[in-house]
């Protein structure tokens, strides 16, 4: 789970992953009355397709925002960027309005900068990870929950359609022994001096540093934190 530093009640964007089928779902919430990492497990989303099987999904908080509209924009942008993935479950949750209208143009640079600025300064901390661990200590599923989860999974396998989607999404991926060895090697992680994003060496050099969208906006990074 990705946990954020603030204990304040902030609007947030989250992601759910089904480890069995590989399907995933994005959502946002601004009506929460408690911090995101405590709210989401009880909220269980408003989407019927995932609410009833929420326990099957692995969840993470992707970002927190002071403004609910910024959270909505970020959710829609994230859906937009993953639209062509056949395992995305948000096909009915993308509203295609205004700057995110897939029939018109892609999100503007101003919109992307706004979302990026909103996220600056919100990072994981050891203490917050400890907080979530403490909040979950002693929690166990009831026998009824275990039985229901067991019954839900009995004899359940991915459908041919789901298998085909998963296969198509991985086509072209090399399967050589060298590739497997490379995947096991630890990947160097570096930090962009302009937006403070940390990521893999190759992608960071491609999209950040001299290519960072915040490089030439004319404002020091400290103004956004």
Image (tube, grey):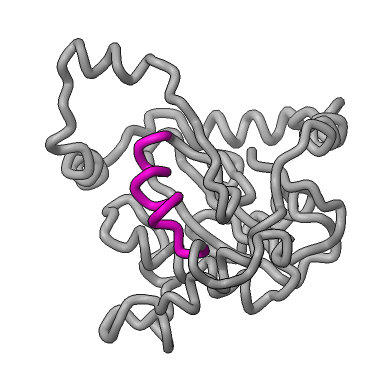
Say above or below: 85 vs 159.
below
194 on left or right of 222: left
Res 20 quadrant in image: top left
Q: Position of residue 196 (x, y in %)?
A: 60, 49
189 on left or right of 36: left
Q: Nearer the viewer, residue 119 or 147?
A: 119
Picture residue at 53% right of the left edge, 46% below the top? 192
Picture residue at 71% right of the left edge, 58% below the top? 43
Picture residue at 26% right of the left edge, 84% below the top? 103
Q: Position of residue 17 (x, y in %)?
A: 48, 43
Q: Nearer the viewer, residue 85 or 210?
A: 210
In the picture, the quarter occupied by the C terminus is bottom right
Picture residue at 55% right of the left edge, 40% below the top? 191
Q: Is residue 174 magenta?
A: no
Say above or below: 56 vs 186.
below
What is the span of residues highlighted in magenta in the rendered image? 201-214
Secondary structure mostly seen in the magenta stretch? helix
Q: Nearer the viewer, residue 45 or 100?
A: 100
Residue furthest to the left: 172
Q: Position of residue 79 (x, y in %)?
A: 42, 64
Q: Is residue 203 magenta?
A: yes
Res 105 quadrant in image: bottom left
Res 90 quadrant in image: bottom left
Q: Position of residue 217 (x, y in %)?
A: 53, 72
Say above or below: 90 vs 185.
below
């Amino acid at each position: 789970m990705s946990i954020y530093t603030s204990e304040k009640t902030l609007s947030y964007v989250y992601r759910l992953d089904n480890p069995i089928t590989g399907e995933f779902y994005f959502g946002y919430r601004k009506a929460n009355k408690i911090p995101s990492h405590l709210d989401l497990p009880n909220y269980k989303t408003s989407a019927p397709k995932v609410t009833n099987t929420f326990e099957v999904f692995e969840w993470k908080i992707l970002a927190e925002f002071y403004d609910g509209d910024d959270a909505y924009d970020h959710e829609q942008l994230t859906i937009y960027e993953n639209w062509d993935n056949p395992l995305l479950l948000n096909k009915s949750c993308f509203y295609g309005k205004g700057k995110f209208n897939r029939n018109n143009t892609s999100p503007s640079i101003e919109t992307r900068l706004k979302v990026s600025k909103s996220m600056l300064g919100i990072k994981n901390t050891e203490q917050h990870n400890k907080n979530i661990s403490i909040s979950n200590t002693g929690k166990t599923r009831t026998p009824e929950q275990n039985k229901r989860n067991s019954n839900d999974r009995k004899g359940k396998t991915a459908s041919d359609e789901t298998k085909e989607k998963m296969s198509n999404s991985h086509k072209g991926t090399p399967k050589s022994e060298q590739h497997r060895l490379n995947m096991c090697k630890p990947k160097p992680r570096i930090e962009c001096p302009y937006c403070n994003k940390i990521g893999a060496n190759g992608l960071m050099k491609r999209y950040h540093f001299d290519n960072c969208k915040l490089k030439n906006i004319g404002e020091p990074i400290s103004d956004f934190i």
